[in-house]
Image (cartoon, helix red, strand yellow):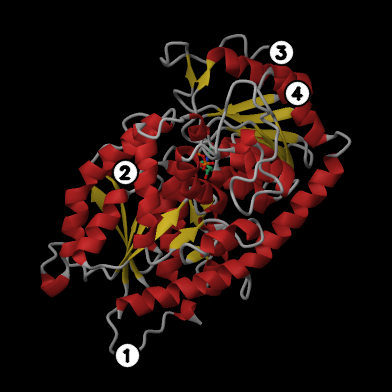
Amino acid sequence: GAFDGKQSSGAAPPHVLVFPFPLQGHVTPMLKLAEVLSLSGIRVTFVSTERNQRRLLSSASVRARLARRPGLHLRCIPEDFPKNNPRNFADAAQMIQEFDAAAQPRLREILSSGSGGADPEGEPPVTCVVADALIKLAVDVAVDLGVPIIGFRTSSACSFWADQCIPDLIATGVITYQDGCDLDELVSWLPGTESFLRRRDLPSLCRVVDTDDPAMQVLRGMTQNVARYQGIIFNTAEFAEPTVLAHVRGQVSTYPIGPLHGLLQTVEHMKGAAGDGGVDGVPFSCNSTSLLQEDRACMEWLDAKPPASVVYVSFGSIALVLREHLLEIWHGLVNSGYHFLWVVRPGFVVDGGGNGGDWPAEAGEGAKGRGYRVEWAPQEEVLGHPAVGCFLTHSGWNSTIEGLWAGVPMACCPNLADQYLSRRMIAELWKIGVEIKNTCDRAAVEKAVREVMGGERASEIRAAAASMSKTAREGVEEGGSSYMNMERLIQDIRAMSS
Ligand code: UDP
């Protein structure tokens, strides 16, 4: 098969440049793809910002693992992204434009060097670019220099599909949010989602009805780029989004190869590269891609807890929370009566003016030792721990697919963008969790946690989660759909390179 690294004679050796947008939720799946490609015998250059590379490599275990990936090289863009966390789509749009401008010269330099030994770092020429779909410049540069380019969408196929459809739907007045409209109404705006999508589930951007809005312009630019890719890679799986993927395929060639952390495990085992041993007590098999230092002490805390007794709480790498909102969530968790492990990143709590606030003194008393707080957790391992019985999540796509893989039922508290879509897929399409519909106040958090941990539907939800997890595992095994799509991707990359 394509994974065995054989190269037909005479063809140029494939050399793939993998280029993620510099945020955790993008670096994670794209580095895993880079690792899968390198284990399959393809030379890979992974480009990150200087700051992210430094953060990634600050872990001895990550350094040791990446050194065991043959043909995987890291290169940098000398930029300090992200300067600030994007708080809404307008911030994100600005960041996308700034990053484009900052990264352009370096990308051009990397892509145009290499041939004839002109590359100062001695790299052979790049034969294919796999670029984050948020990086618009990558398409311009690659097309200009005649290098084939494949896009990578780090969110769901459904979110991609919404982005493809939304600008036109808004421009033609199909999507409307008048005062008093019924947010729970099922809408048929996105083909393939009619059976589950409600008005309230569309990305927050849909509330921006001004088509001249800069954020809308950025979205339109991304939409128009789609035709210039040879195909698009998704960290999703056929079984998770079959109806939407069928529609997406009508527009662009797709490679649904997720969950990528699962696929990486399969390929590691095939190649005998799965880590026994490790560094600093961290097994290689953890495959961490964290940009923040993981606090591993929480694993021992979990070890002492009974099966399915702990709520794991994380809102991802970007979200900020108002102090009073944080207290609501905290009270909800305490009132639920369960143990909880909570990720509170440095700078996560903000005051009304958006400035960094401290952890409120009120939170900490009253939990009677039931709550454990870390600044950053080894999330994949935490979700895989038998003590975890519920994942209170913001429904970021990586968290969603990691929760699905682990078979941990979720309570969803989305915050922006595509997180509303993921919440709906979790609670309604797959039925592997529950939604928090409006505000995540203490009553709503307590209710959702109780429902998942021991309520009437708990065993039903748990069974559905276990079944989805099993299906996800079959998908990345030899012959499974994600595995086969990955084989096809590798074959296509080899063909493009020759
Ligand atoms: N994550 C982690 N440790 C934490 C919190 C989050 O490793 O304590 C990881 C998580 O496993 C996921 C990523 O950070 O891979 C967050 O990505 P997601 O798409 O869920 O949300 P975003 O950060 O983009 O909002």
**Mark before the other along the chain sequence, 4 or 3:** 3
Q: Which residue is mark 4?
A: 446
Marks 1 and 4 in Cβ contact (< 8 Å): no
Quick one: label 4, few (<14), some, or many (20+) residues within 10 Å? many
Residue at the (66%, 61%) spot, across then down: 239
Query: For this view, does 158 lie left or right of residue 279?
Result: right
Q: Which residue is mark 3?
A: 366
Q: Amino acid at mark 3?
A: Gly
Q: Amino acid at mark 4?
A: Glu
Q: Locate residue 192: give its quadrant.
A: bottom right
Residue at the (60%, 41%) spot, across then down: 421
Locate residue 272, reporting x and y percent: 52, 72
Pointer 2 residue Cβ closer than 8 Å to ligand 1 = no
**Mark before the other along the chain sequence, 1 or 4:** 1
- Between 60 and 451, the residue placed more toward the observer is 451
Q: Nearer the viewer, mark 3 or mark 1?
A: 1
Marks 3 and 2 in Cβ contact (< 8 Å): no
Q: Which residue is mark 1?
A: 9
